[in-house]
Amino acid sequence: MLAFEMRRSPLTEEQTGLFDALMASNLPGFRALVQSTLKFQSEILGFAPALRGAPQRREQAYADEDLMHAEVFTDGTALYPIVVERTTRRTFQWFRARPHGEEIVERESPYAWLTLYYIGPEFGSTGLRYLEAEVNRAFGVSLKPNYYRSRRFRELATEGTAHKLKPTENELQIARLLANRTMRELALAIKSTGGLLEKDLHRQLRDKDEDVAAAIRDRLLSADLIRSDLVVICKRTQTQVARVASREILEKSDALGVKCACGRPFTDESVEEFAYITENGRALLDASRWLTLLVVDELRRIGAPEGKIIIEHQMGGDELDCLAEVGGELVFFELKDKEFNIGNAYSFGAKIGIAKPVYPVILSTVGVGGDAKEHFQRAGLSGDSGDRQSDDYEADFRVIGASSQRAPVRYIEGLDQMRVEVEKLATEIYTQEAIRVLKRALQVASVDPFELVGAVAARVQEGAAMGLATTEERPFAPEAN
Ligand SMILES: [Zn+2]
C-alpha cells in the first residue's frame, strides 16, 4: 500500500527565510533531490539558477505564484516533499476548498504555509517522525497532522443523522471473531432462536461436528457474545420448567422445597446447559455491526482521520452504511453479510445518487451476483463511462490537477479480500495526491528558462562568449571576431 501523510504549520514572513537553515543542516540518511539537481545544473551552466515559480516570477506561473521554496528529500524508501507557499487570495481559497488542518480554516490567513509530506510504504514511519522534528527545529514551529477534505463529506456530515464510530480494541477483537463464518452462523442461530441447548449446538453447523461446536461455544463464551445458563427439563413432560444461572441455585431451591409441577425436585430432573446471546452479542450482530466495525478498522489503517468516518447515516428512507473521507475523497461502503443481488443494486444506485461519492464500494461477505454486476454495467456505473462529478474542488482550482470524476463501483467479494482491496483503494487515492504534490514541488528542480535566456542575451549584448561552463574541448565554440 502507498501511504500519504501531511504535516503543516503557518509561517511568518521571517520564518520563511529559515528554509536555507534546514537545507544547511545535516540530515543523516537523507538526500535532497531538488538541491542536488540545481547544483548539478549550475555546474553545467556556470551560474546559480534561480528557482522557477518564485514569487517574483508571476508573469509565467498561474497556479504556482505562491511557491516560495520546495525540496524533496528521500531516505531511499520514501519521498518527503517539503514546500513553503506564500498565501495569496488564490491559495487561501484553495486551502478552503481542499486541504486544511482542523484548527486552521477559519483563521486569518498567515503569511505562508510550511507543509511536509510523506509518500512511502507505511503510516507513522520513523523517517517522517525524524524529519518532522528536524523541520520543527529549523523553523521554530510545531507541525500538525493535516488532511485533505471533501466538501461532499462535510455536507453529508451535517445532513441527516450520522454517528461516528470509534471501536475499542476489545470490540474489534470480537468483530474479528465474528468474521469467521461458522462462528457467526452459530452466534446468529443462538440469537434468532432465543437460545439453544448446548448439546444441540452442533446441529446448527453444516458438518454437524460436535467438537467444532464445543470449541466455538468456548470462544463465544469467553468473548461474552453468549452466556450459559442451566435449564431444568421435566422428565415426564419433556418441557423446560426452569432456568437458572448455576447448580447451586437448584440445590437451594430443593432445600426451600421448590419442585417441578410433576412433583420431583429440580435436581432429580434432567439439567442441561443452555446458551443465549448477550446484549453485547446482540449489538454486534444486529445490522451486521461487526462488519461495519471491521471496515472502520480497515479505514483507520489506511489513514482515514479520526472522526472522518460516518456509519449508518440515515437520509430520507435510505441508510448509508459507511462514509469516509480518505485523502480528501468521499468513499461510500455498502455492506452485506449475504449475496449482493439485483434488488440491492437498484437501491445502491439510488444511494449513489444521494451520497455522490467519488469511490462507491460494495462489500459482500458472499459475493456480488452476476445480474447485479450486469445492472451496474448497463447503468454506466461499473466502467469509466460514469457521469462526471465535480465534488470537491472549485472550478478555479482544477489547474492544480484535481479531478473528481466518479470512479467505477468497486466490489469486495469475501472478507478475505477486504484488506487487499481497501489497500488498493488507498493506493489509488494517494497516488493522485502524491503526483499532485510532486508536480508542484519538482517545478523548482529546473533552471528558470527566463533567467537562462536572459543570461545568454546579456552575454550576446556584451559581445562576449557565452561563458557557460562546458567540457574542455568546445569543438563548436563560436569563433572570436
Ligand atoms: Zn417434572
Image (tube, rainbow, N blue to C red):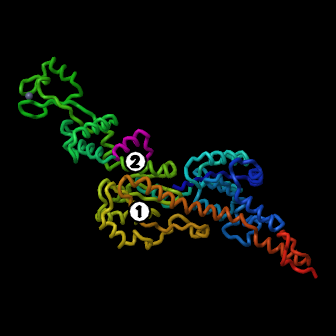
Mark 2, secondary structure of its residue = helix
Percent across and percent down for residue 68 are: 73, 60
- Amino acid type at mark 2: Leu
- Amino acid type at mark 1: Arg
Q: Are marks 1 and 2 in contact (CB under 8 Å)?
A: no
Question: According to the image, label 2 marks what residue?
Answer: 293
Kindly identify the residue that appears in the image at 49 percent across and 56 percent down.
325
Which residue is more in the foreground, 69 or 416?
416
Percent across and percent down for residue 130 are: 65, 45
Mark positioned earlier in the residue sequence (1 or 2): 2
Q: Residues within 10 Å of mark 2 (few under 14, many from 20)?
A: many
Kindly identify the residue that appears in the image at 54 percent across and 59 percent down.
430
The stretch drawn in magenta includes residue 449: no
C-alpha distance separating marks 1 and 2:
20 Å
**Which quarter of the figure has residue 481?**
bottom right
- Which range of residues does the magenta coloring cover? 165-179
Q: Does residue 269 appear left or right of residue 375 in this picture?
A: left
Mark 1, secondary structure of its residue = strand
Res 384 seen here: yes
**Which quarter of the figure has residue 2?**
bottom right
Percent across and percent down for residue 14 are: 77, 52
Q: Is residue 191 above or below residue 434?
A: above
Q: Is residue 147 above or below residue 223?
A: below
The stretch drawn in magenta includes residue 171: yes
Q: In which of the image's four quarters is ligand 1 placed?
A: top left
Question: According to the image, label 1 marks what residue?
Answer: 410
Q: Is residue 210 above or below residue 156?
A: above
Percent across and percent down for residue 214 are: 25, 36
Label 2 CB, ligand 1: below 8 Å?
A: no
In front: label 1 or label 2 = 1
Kindly identify the residue that appears in the image at 33 percent across and 54 percent down.
365
